[in-house]
Image (cartoon, helix red, strand yellow):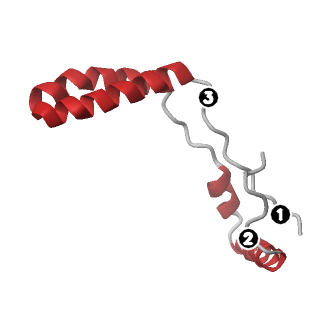
Amino acid sequence: MRLRGGNVLSSYDRRRFNEIVSGLLAEDPSFATRQHTERELPSRPFVALLLWMSMPLLMALGGWTGFLIAMVAGVYGVRLWFRGAGAHRERPVPRHDE
């Protein structure tokens, strides 16, 4: 997956960055493992349900401020629900090609 916006770094900066990454990988091989492990995120419908269940509590305890926060939580819950469980963004894979 390519990031939008083209090349942000100059060729010198990319080369220097790749040298730094190569040095880190040589010094600490577990660095790559720690950086590339995918953490397990809760499914979006589960988070949406938690947001919806928090709405009455927010409204009861928070007054008008709680009502506004509950509305934001509800709208975000709807957004998460319709995006579904399989719509997690993929992390961009770093390129080491110089």
Instruction: Determine whether, in the image, residue 91 is placed left or right of residue 73.
Output: right
**Residue 39 spot, x, y in % from top left:** 56, 42
Quadrant in the picture for residue 24: bottom right
Quadrant in the picture for residue 85: top right
Task: Identify the residue at horizontal 55%, vertical 37% (top origin).
Answer: 40
> Disc 1 designates what residue?
96
Amino acid type of the residue that numbered disc 3 sits on in the rendered structure = Ala
- Tell me, yes or no, if residue 84 can be seen here: no
Label 3 to label 1: alpha-carbon separation: 27 Å
> Disc 3 designates what residue?
87
Up-down relation of residue 54 to residue 31 (above or below): above
Amino acid type of the residue that numbered disc 1 sits on in the rendered structure = His
Mark before the other along the chain sequence, 1 or 2: 2
Task: Identify the residue at horizontal 62%, vertical 25% (top origin).
Answer: 86
Of residues 95 and 39, which is closer to you in this image?
95
Q: Secondary structure at mark 1?
A: loop
**Residue 94 spot, x, y in % from top left:** 75, 57
Mark before the other along the chain sequence, 3 or 2: 2
Task: From the image, state whether disc 3 or disc 1 is nearer to you.
Answer: 3
Q: Secondary structure at mark 2?
A: helix
> Disc 2 designates what residue?
21
Mark before the other along the chain sequence, 3 or 1: 3
**Residue 4 spot, x, y in % from top left:** 73, 51
Label 1 to label 2: alpha-carbon separation: 9 Å
Q: Pointer 1 and pointer 2: residues touching (CB < 8 Å)?
A: yes
Instruction: Determine whether, in the image, residue 57 is placed left or right of residue 91.
Output: left
Q: Residue furthest right?
A: 98
How packed is label 2: few (under 14 Cα within 10 Å), some, or many (20 or more)? Answer: some
Quarter that holds the N terminus: top right
Task: Identify the residue at horizontal 79%, vertical 77% (top origin).
Answer: 19
Up-down relation of residue 22 to residue 86 (above or below): below
How packed is label 3: few (under 14 Cα within 10 Å), some, or many (20 or more)? Answer: few
